[in-house]
Image (cartoon, rainbow, N blue to C red):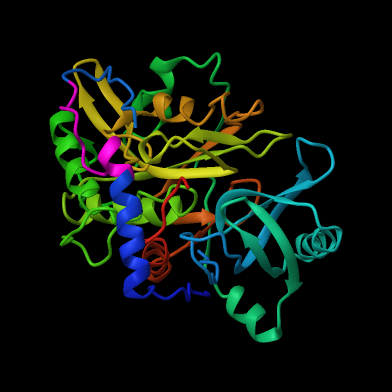
Amino acid sequence: MSKFTLRRKAATTVAAYAIAVAGILASINSCNKSAPAPATPKETIAQTTKTPLLTGSRLSSSDESAIVTVANIRRAEDGRSSEVAFCELAELFTVTDAAAVAKLENGLAAKAGVKITFNAWTGIVKAAEPLTKQESAAHSAAPVLSTPGIVRSVDMAHVNPDEINSADALGIMDKTSAGLTNIIPDLATANLMFDYITHQCCALPGPYAIDQCISFQYCQDGCYARAHKMCYIINKKYNYATHKIFSFANSGSDRLSVKALKWGGCCVTWWYHVAPLVNVNTPTGVKAYVFDPAMFDQPVLLSTWLHFQENPACSSTANVTMINIQPTASYSPSGYSGLTFNTDPTYSSTNSTLSSYSMRITCP
């Protein structure tokens, strides 16, 4: 499994990052949860694998390189360029260079990794090259988890919130790991856990209570690593069970589009997203709640989390195609179908991803 090789910048770069983050956090909600916990489960929205081998910095407009697996290539909305999804990156990219498209298509057909040069600010892939034998051997060594999970096609415009938010209706009430408590007793407890997790945000000065801060302030990518680390905390520190909720936009021209209200208000586009899913006891029954501090300031119901990814102000084709509730071990999708997943049992990819994204910000 390949690992991030991005190194921590010099002191001047860190200082520039701190100034940029301070400006954002001074005017909007930060990683710190500022609003009180809701009294009822009807909460309001807070206004707010394989790891690719990356080089470069999100603090500048410089290009980066990554070793990735092509999940899908499709025609872009403009009809002239192509859009490409990579298994290791949640961000959806655009490709205009014909030679790069051809090499990506070869990689997709051969189910082989490719090395790409891209700009994360613009979401554009500029070049693609086949891997060397050594790169290919390292890239294909990641373990894959084949589990059907709980897969559902969704139509959020007509979804029944009572059904999609019900842990029992989703079929996750009795599916948990041995030795873990399956139901969090109340929202107050869930909020305390959420508070602890948000205080591990890399945008905050620390010290952190865990070995690696979590890059909530960079929601352009890395949801797979954030989710894996959050599940570890919920399982190990609090002894509560978790699932992973994966949302996909893997049909037609669908895309997941959100407005990063916590980090400056720019639009972020993904082909998939993932976060921890937990069962919380409420006055109206056990509900499915999502922990996603990159998007919200509190745990939110599953329906709220999904609706937030269909922002029409960011894309006319914003649509959640399907969801897949996976065991905690699933890390990132290993194919466009969203049915098989890479794993990270040692948390090596998780920690290297979070470290590499620790100094990045979402909006320019």
Q: Which residues are magenta?
A: 24-38
Q: Residue at x 18, y 59 (%)?
A: 206
Q: Answer left or right for 345 relative to 206.
A: right
Q: Is residue 196 above or below residue 170?
A: below
Q: Residue at x 66, y 28 (%)?
A: 317
Give the total of numbered labels: 0
What is the quadrant of residue 249 in the picture?
top right
The answer to whether residue 46 is magenta is no
Q: Residue at x 31, y 64 (%)?
A: 15
- From where the camera sits, is residue 225 visible? yes
Q: Answer left or right for 276 relative to 156.
A: left
Question: Residue 205 location in percent, x, y?
Answer: 20, 58
Q: Is residue 269 above or below residue 225?
A: above
Question: Residue 344 location in percent, x, y?
Answer: 43, 65
Outermost residue, bottom side? 134
Question: Residue 217 location in percent, x, y?
Answer: 36, 49
Q: Is residue 167 above or below residue 147?
A: above
Q: Is residue 162 above or below residue 81?
A: above
Q: Answer left or right for 328 relative to 66.
A: left
What is the quadrant of residue 153 in the picture?
top right
The answer to whether residue 32 is magenta is yes
Question: Residue 147 location in percent, x, y?
Answer: 52, 51
Q: Answer left or right for 274 relative to 41.
A: right
Question: Is the stretch drawn in magenta largely helix, strand or loop?
Answer: loop
What is the quadrant of residue 242 in the picture?
top left
Viewer-nearest residue: 103 or 327? 103
Viewer-nearest residue: 174 or 165? 165
- From where the camera sits, is residue 347 visible? no
Q: Residue at x 28, y 49 (%)?
A: 22
